[in-house]
Every structure is written in C-alpha cells, then in structure tokens.
C-alpha cells in the first residue's frame, strides 16, 4: 500500500497504454472502466458485487450528493467510502456537467453557477471553491476540476470562451484543493472539436499542473466519428506520465477505440442503465431481452461469460423476470453488463502488455460482426 498518489505506466502498444494508478485505498489497473455510483450506489448492485465484476474504482456525483443527502451529512457519517461501504478508490465529478444537464433555472457567471435543485427546487451555488469543498467532504480519492462543458454543436467563439472560463476555474480549483497527499486533482481539457483550442486548453492545464488529466466535452452529441477524430490528436497534448481520463464514454466500441488512441480511464452509465432497461451487451451484439424470441430459449445470454446471470440462468428466465418487472432482472442484467465491460478492459490490459493489442482489437470487432448467437 502507499500513502501517495502515483501512476506507473507499465507498457504501451502503439498509442494504447497499460499501467497502474496507486492510491492509499488501493490500485487501479489501467485501462480502467469506472462504474457510475451517482447517488452513493451503483444502481441494482451491492458494492461487493461491483467488486466481483472486476472494478477497482467507482464514481460518485457531486451534484446529486450535494443535494441529497448533502456532503456535510456524508462527512458527519464518516465520508462516502464508509457511507456506501466501498473501501477502494472513488472518483467524483465536479458537478458542473450535471448542473447544466439536470438542474433548473441555471445562471452561469465568472464566479460559478447558481441553480435550482431538480429534486425540490431549492437554490444552490457551485463554484470551483465549493466543488473542491464538497469533494473533500465526500472524501473522494480523485477530485475533478470544476469546469463548463459546452453542448455541441456550438460555434467556435462560444467553445473558445467556455474553454477559457474552464481554464480560469481550473486554476481556482487547484488553489482551493490545497495540499492533500494521497488525493489527486485532475484537470479537464475542453475545446470542442477544435485542435488549436484543445491544444491551448492542454497547455493551460499543464502550466497549472495536475495529478491526472481528463478529456472533457466529448460524447455530447458529436457522434463516434467526430469523437475519434478529436481523440486522434487530443490525448497526445497531455503528459505521457499521467493518467488520461475520457469522461462519460461509452459503448464497448467507443471504449476500445478510445484506448487505442491513448486513453487510460473511462466511465459511463450505459452498462448499469441498460441493465435496467433490458439491453444486454455481449461479445457478439447487443441483445434486447424483452424480445419474444427469448421466451423459450434455454441458452445463457453468452455461453463464454462467467457472470452469475450467464452461469445460472437461461434467456427464457431473464426474459420472464424482465417482462414481469422483477427486481432480480435489473440485478442480473446490470451485473452481466458490468462484468462484460470489465472483461473488455482486462482483455485490453493483457493484450497491450503482450504487444498484441491490434490482434485483440481485430477479434473484438470480428466477433461483433457475427451478430447474436
Ligand atoms: N461525456 C460527456 C461528459 C460527461 C461528464 C460527466 S462524467 C461523470 C459522471 C458521473 C460521475 C463522475 C463523472 C463530464 N463531466 C465534466 N466535469 N466535464 C465534462 O466535460 C463532461 C463530459
């Protein structure tokens, strides 16, 4: 164990990298997929089940937790790790993105954002300083800078103005974060799909200095092709010796494409949210368990998968409990999806270590062309 935060880059294969993030609460193997635990729970999962899927770290949400049950109450109860019974690392987002996508009556100024809670309409303010305080009260191991993520498409001037505001907020986040050994503050690169603005943002963040760097402002409606075009150059603007985190991404092929372009960490609600809506990710395709074709099918979702859903239940059963709106449906399908996402990450870590990432990527895509078994 360590009392410091550090990143060891173990191997590269082309632009793909594999390594380990060392934190006082344990190691995070990269490339890493981070399940989202928005309101202090990965929905439909016990923490020990999340760990059993292979997750080393999970995400918490400043926006949701500041509204309910509040960061001060979680702090009084011993912090988020104790509160949600997750002893390993937690990364929390800074809240700005969720304010812009969820809250009402938002007012954005140089100081920060004021808004009304989507829960009870109460008024709140988030600034870089308040976001750092909330994330400190939660006790998260990796803290994200307070930033503004412009919706795409936006005109270039709007994107430039928003990025430069986020860079001023990054400086204020750094100052407010203070000296917290064993904890990390990650900067967030913005700049839309504009190479020069992305480079300007990266340079500004490197001047300030962070323990890790995120690529923000992608997967906001631009589509996979445009996202990959940006990832063809943006990660290279960031320091090689620090973790690179692509925020809020994505589908399995998004994740593989991002790792191939030099990304180390990703998060997405997709596997858990889809698990609750009957959308199942397998190595061959996406299966909608609601479809009548599964009603009499005695086979597992994926005969190669070792998760509890695939080891112990038929498609017919999973179809039945989904149609019957039984709780076990969300539990089993979420477990399977998270297990499958972690299986992809483990496969990539091994392939990059062996220098066979290109072959692994080719097989990943070839299997998906086969379609459902
Ligand atoms: N992919 C869109 C996206 C998603 C998130 C949210 S990622 C997340 C969600 C829940 C918990 C932790 C992290 C973002 N967060 C920030 N701060 N900045 C962005 O540009 C951005 C873009």
Image (cartoon, grey):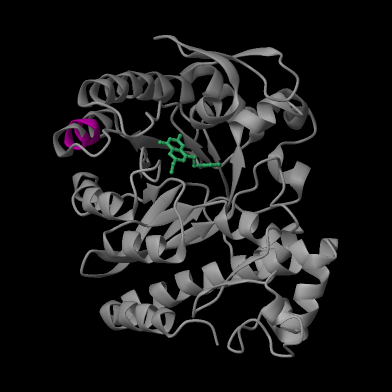
Reply above or below: 301 against 139. below
Q: Residue 223 appears at what percent x and percent y?
A: 34, 50
**Residue drawn at (58%, 30%), measured in percent from left and top?**
135
Reply above or below: 116 against 56. above
Q: Residue 141 appears at what percent x and percent y?
A: 55, 42
Reply above or below: 195 against 130. below
Seen in the image, is 202 located left or right of residue 49?
left
- Number of numbered discs: 0
Quadrant of the image containing the N terminus? bottom right
The boundaries of the magenta stretch are 198-203
Most distant residue in the left direction:
196
Q: Residue 212 appears at what percent x and percent y?
A: 37, 43
**Residue drawn at (68%, 24%), measured in percent from left and top?**
118
Residue 97 belongs to magenta span: no
Most distant residue in the front direction:
292
**Residue drawn at (43%, 45%), measured in percent from left and top?**
247
Quadrant in the picture for residue 228? bottom left
Q: Main secondary structure of the magenta part?
A: helix
Residue 199 belongs to magenta span: yes
Seen in the image, is 303 located left or right of residue 308?
left
Seen in the image, is 296 located left or right of residue 10?
right
Quadrant in the picture for residue 52? bottom right
Reply above or below: 331 against 173. below
Seen in the image, is 213 located left or right of residue 143?
left
Quadrant of the image containing the C terminus? bottom right
Q: Residue 371 appears at what percent x and percent y?
A: 47, 82
């Amino acid at each position: 164990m360590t009392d410091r935060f550090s990143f060891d880059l173990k191997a590269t294969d082309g632009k793909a990298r594999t390594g380990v993030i060392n934190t006082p609460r344990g190691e995070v193997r990269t490339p890493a997929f981070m399940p989202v635990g928005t309101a202090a729970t990965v929905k439909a999962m016990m923490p020990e089940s999340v760990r059993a899927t292979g997750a080393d770290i999970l995400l918490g949400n400043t926006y949701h937790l500041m509204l309910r049950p509040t960061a001060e109450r979680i702090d009084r109860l011993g912090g988020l790790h104790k509160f949600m019974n997750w002893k390993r690392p937690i990364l929390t987002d800074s809240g700005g993105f969720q304010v812009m996508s969820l809250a009402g009556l938002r007012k954005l100024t140089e100081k920060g954002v004021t808004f009304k809670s989507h829960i009870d309409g109460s008024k709140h303010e988030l600034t870089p300083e308040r976001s750092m305080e909330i994330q400190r009260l939660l006790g998260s191991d990796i803290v994200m800078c307070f930033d503004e993520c412009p919706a795409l498409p936006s005109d270039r001037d709007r994107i430039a103005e928003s990025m430069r505001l986020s860079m001023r907020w990054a400086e204020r986040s750094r100052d407010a974060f203070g000296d917290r050994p064993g904890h990390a503050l990650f900067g967030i690169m913005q700049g839309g799909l504009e190479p020069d603005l992305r480079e300007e943002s990266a340079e500004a963040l490197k001047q300030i200095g962070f323990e890790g760097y995120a690529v923000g402002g992608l997967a906001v409606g631009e589509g996979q092709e445009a996202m990959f075009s940006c990832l063809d150059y943006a990660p290279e603007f960031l320091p090689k010796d620090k973790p690179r985190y692509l925020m809020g991404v994505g589908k399995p092929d998004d994740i593989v494409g991002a790792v191939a372009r030099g990304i180390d960490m990703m998060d997405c609600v997709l596997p858990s949210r889809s698990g609750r809506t009957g959308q199942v990710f397998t190595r061959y395709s996406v299966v909608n368990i609601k479809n009548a074709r599964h009603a009499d099918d005695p086979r597992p979702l994926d005969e190669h998968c070792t998760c509890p859903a695939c080891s112990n239940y038929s498609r017919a059963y999973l179809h039945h409990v989904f149609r019957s709106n039984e709780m076990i449906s969300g539990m089993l399908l979420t477990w399977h999806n998270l297990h499958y996402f972690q299986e992809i990450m483990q496969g990539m870590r091994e392939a990059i270590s062996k220098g066979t990432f290109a072959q692994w990527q080719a097989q990943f895509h070839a299997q998906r062309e086969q379609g459902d078994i």
